Image (cartoon, rainbow, N blue to C red):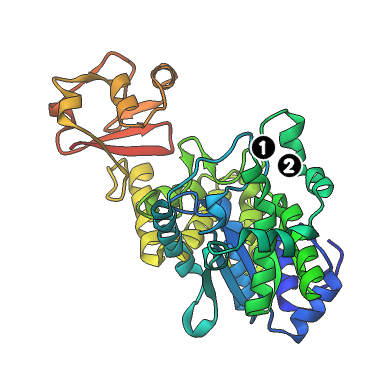
Amino acid sequence: MTYRAKSDFLHVMIERGYLADCTDLQSLDDALIQGPVTAYIGYDATAASLHVGHLLNIMMLRWFQKTGNRPLTLMGGGTTKVGDPSFRSEERPLLTPDAIQSNIDGMGQVFARYLDYGDGKALMLNNAEWLDNLNYLEFLRDIGRHFSVNRMLSFESVKSRLDREQSLSFLEFNYMILQAYDFLELYRRYDCRLQMGGSDQWGNIINGIDLTRRVLDGEIFGLTSPLLTTSDGRKMGKSAGGAVWLNGAMLSPYEFWQFWRNTTDADVGRFLKLYTELPVDECDRLGALSGSEINAAKVILANEVTTLLHGAEAAASAEATAREVFEQGGAGGDLEIATIGADALGAGLSVVQLLVQTGIAPSGKEAKRLIAEGGLRLNNEAIADPQLVVDAGLIGDGLKVSVGKKKHRMVQVG
């Protein structure tokens, strides 16, 4: 990116690597200079928590506020009832209104860690407020007439589904119209002039800009972030155990800290820029370290990211637990607990069955592979026998299970 931004926000976006594309950089830059500007990102309530894949855009909202602007977090209480078909192979399962509200409540806990909602400095909104009571015929006449089906079919998010001859329901096809209408309503109600999102949302963002210009003749903008993959090609936010959740009740602060501590060497500098607020020069310095020194940089990364989400005390506790586990061979007070019922344990299970039933290994085949490769330790003792029986006596008050060098659990009988 060669554009030299004049506004603080775009300077941060470009310098730290957040910017993938923008509808009109020069005009947006001018608007931000005249500022403040209001911007939003939309989040459908499809799960009880946001995950690490959302964190890049949450950081964009945080920087937007830190540079003097007003961020809106738009919860998709209405659009979740339809489901975004973008780049999906099948329709999302439909959720009940109660389930959607429960998910919104869980997601709201995360936003409160990154944004200041006091005195209207940021707003959390729900698009059910204007979508739930739409008059269908009026909506078709006043809004639907601005959309070309030919153009909608050309968007990559829809085209890829149809090219694979996978069904796209009329319900899902309406999603992009509803999302575009969100931008129109936010501009009308809150003078919101910028929508941000991942680059997979580019088509939906453009729809909203076109609709708002047609209906209200407003000058509004779209800005997207890159879809991140790690240096080894994995989708950002995924681990061997599944999604890396941001709610502490779904993933412990220790496990969250460990996710960042286990960052690949080549990603450290980039992730420091995107997920922390350390100065860019310091991020570059830490990312350029090698050998054992890069591990110290990973600890800084883990501490900084965990502090933003869970607080400095949780980050310090996670680091102390990791040091005890890895350097001193202890159990570690913050290790995630894996519980097995007394009935399920019975008189004892093979260590393979134990690993599967507690979710430490995804399958018996994987558990046996770990053991065969010398990757399993119980209370720091290497295990070579997949038929080893684990009973209540061996578990005692807690059995430390280590899989490889980086994954540790405390198994208890519940």
Q: Which mark is residue 168?
A: 1
Q: Residue at x 68, y 41 (%)?
A: 87
Q: Quadrant of the N terminus?
A: bottom right
Q: Residue at x 38, y 18 (%)?
A: 364
Pick the front one: 395 or 148: 148
In the rendering, at what x and y percent does residue 303 appear? Answer: 47, 59
Numbered marks: total: 2
In the rendering, at what x and y percent does residue 31 appear? Answer: 78, 80
Q: Residue furthest front?
A: 137
Eyeballing the image, is 157 above or below 273?
above
The residue beneath circle 2 is: 158
Q: Amino acid at mark 2?
A: Val
Pick the front one: 197 or 93: 93
- Mark 2 secondary-structure assignment: helix
Q: Residue at x 72, y 55 (%)?
A: 204
- Mark 1 secondary-structure assignment: loop
Q: Amino acid at mark 1?
A: Leu
Q: Badge 1 local density, few (<14 within 10 Å), some, or many (20+)?
A: some
For residue 164, what is the image quadrant?
Answer: top right
